[in-house]
Image (tube, rainbow, N blue to C red):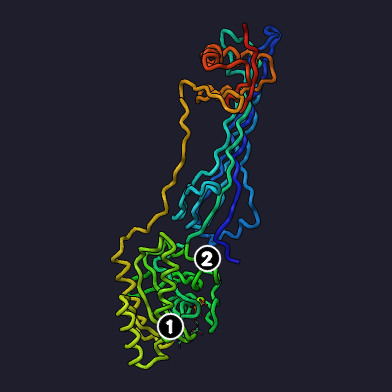
Amino acid sequence: MWIDEAKIHVAGGQGGDGLISFHRTKYNPLGTPDGGHGGDGGDVILEATRSMNTLLHFSHQVHFKAEDGGSGGPNRRQGKRGKDLVIPVPVGTVVRDLYTGAVLADLCEEGMKVVVAHGGKGGRGNSAFVSNRWKGPKIRELGEPGEKRWLKLELRLLADVGLVGFPNVGKSSFLSRVSRKKVKVAPYPFTTLEPHLGVVEVDGKSFVLADLPGLVEGAHEGKGLGDRFLRHATRARVLLHMVDLAGVEGRDPLEDYRAVRRELEAWDELRGKPEVVAGNKVDLLSRDEVARRISRFRAAGVEIHPISVVTGEGVRELLHLLVRKLEEVAKEIPKAAPATRTWKLVPRKGFRVSREDGIWVVEGREIERLGRLDLSTEDARAYLEEELERRGVFRALRRAGWQGEPIRIGNIEVEFELEG
Ligand SMILES: Nc1nc2c(ncn2[C@@H]2O[C@H](COP(=O)(O)OP(=O)(O)OP(=O)(O)O)[C@@H](O)[C@H]2O)c(=O)[nH]1
Ligand SMILES: [Mg+2]
């Protein structure tokens, strides 16, 4: 099966914990603090590769996690950094945050990479906390958890020309005729169930043509195969809109044209895209009839190019026209929205206190680092209290009306007795 959509969960590695350790000798029985820092957790990275062309892999595996960082060792030994996890995805994958829908990256070229989940930072060992006040601290930080998020991956084929139209009009026949790609052709609708790409060569120039499954009226509401394959046409620079000019199935070609146009109009990214219209199967009509039908289109403001994929009539002219059109439109492939990240503004140096549901939250880049302390030792609890006092956090809390309620700092939640 051809899969062009997937949901995956990614998790950066957990940072390693810092270590509490003392180097003791005969002459120094208390020992020198020498606990090393934990290593950072690895990142999860998506990388675009041409060696994959579907997202099928992701229907078998959904959860991806990078390696955790190692714990710090004695003798100030730093824990090992967790290995990054590099996940290959096909070129043309658009990466979104599943919940916000925001585009995180558009991996439209071979080798493009994006970090989708950062590893957590390693915690510091007790060697880092030595000071005049703390000669032999039993204080360490725990490693931070890695970032975690759900992603939605969408594959968008990178074609120059996207072939759209009703089922059975001859789209696959056309691709098979003008490129080396052979696609199944049959006299019934919905023969093609997945997009196919072919390279078309004309007079030393070439372009990539995408044959897309047929559309029907109401496709954007899910009729027929629906319009989900139209996503692939959003990357194309030109649309080749094919109609069955002979009306083999008894429909009116101009009505077909309009119905497909309505489906295209439902997509912002397709609405204004340059379109070339081809009227196929003219071998089934008399010259007069062809002329009559073309002038009907013309009267409706649509320039249609008569062709027969079976006899080859008009096909070369159409290819030339497509090449010219491609040269006309801007060389640039429209890119999806650039990667965006929303940052919560948190003071770097100072801090901010606020109240949320009966809890006081202290925010600030440096203050939040205190939230990594391992509070299982008395030293660490004393250190935290002294740091909060020294930095004026208690003062700020009291001023804001704090009365001994729990306080959240980064990952931890603590309670202090309010004196007096
Ligand atoms: N007479 C005639 N028949 C054609 C021509 N082009 C295609 N056909 C026939 O039309 C039928 C449908 O062709 P396909 O190429 O499978 O059509 P499609 O648009 O890819 O159809 P779906 O994949 O179902 O959307 C087949 O029986 C083809 O042989 C043509 O120029 N003249
Ligand atoms: Mg087909």
Queried on whether the Cβ of the residue with tag 2 lies below 8 angstroms from ligand 1, the answer reads: no
Viewer can see residue 107:
yes
Residue assigned mark 1: 252
- Would you say the residues marked 2 and 1 are in contact, meaning their CB atoms lie under 8 Å apart? no
**Mark sitting earlier along the chain (2/1):** 2
Q: Is residue 200 left or right of residue 417?
A: left
| Amino acid under disc 1 | Asp
Q: Is residue 180 above or below residue 147?
A: below
User: Where residue 198 sits in the image (x, y, percent)?
Assistant: 45, 71
Task: Say which residue appears at 69% left-offset and 11% top-offset.
Answer: 25
Q: Does the closest atom of ligand 1 sit within 8 Å of the Cβ of label 1? A: no
Label ID, residue 306: none
Q: Which residue is mark 2?
A: 221
Task: Report the residue at 41% width, 60% height from top.
Answer: 269
| x, y percent for residue 199 | 43, 71
- What SS does tag 1 mark? loop
Determine the residue positioned at 55% across, 61% down: 4
User: Looking at this view, is 258 or 230 the one in front?
Assistant: 258
Query: Is 162 or 258 nearer to us in this picture?
Result: 258
Out of 164 and 179, give the one closest to the viewer.
164
Taking 366 as reference, is 189 above or below it? below
Q: Amino acid at mark 2?
A: Glu
The answer to whether 183 appears left or right of 297 in the picture is: right
Answer above or below: position of 207 versus 249. above
Residue 63 x %, y % = 64, 48
Disc 1 residue crowd, few under 14, some 14–19, many 20+, Cα 10 Å: some
| Mark 2 closeness class: few <14, some 14–19, many ≥20 residues within 10 Å | few
Instruction: Identify the residue at image location x=30%, y=80%.
Output: 299
Q: CA distance from mark 2 to mark 1?
A: 22 Å
Residue 75 appears in the picture as rendered = no
Q: Secondary structure at mark 2?
A: helix
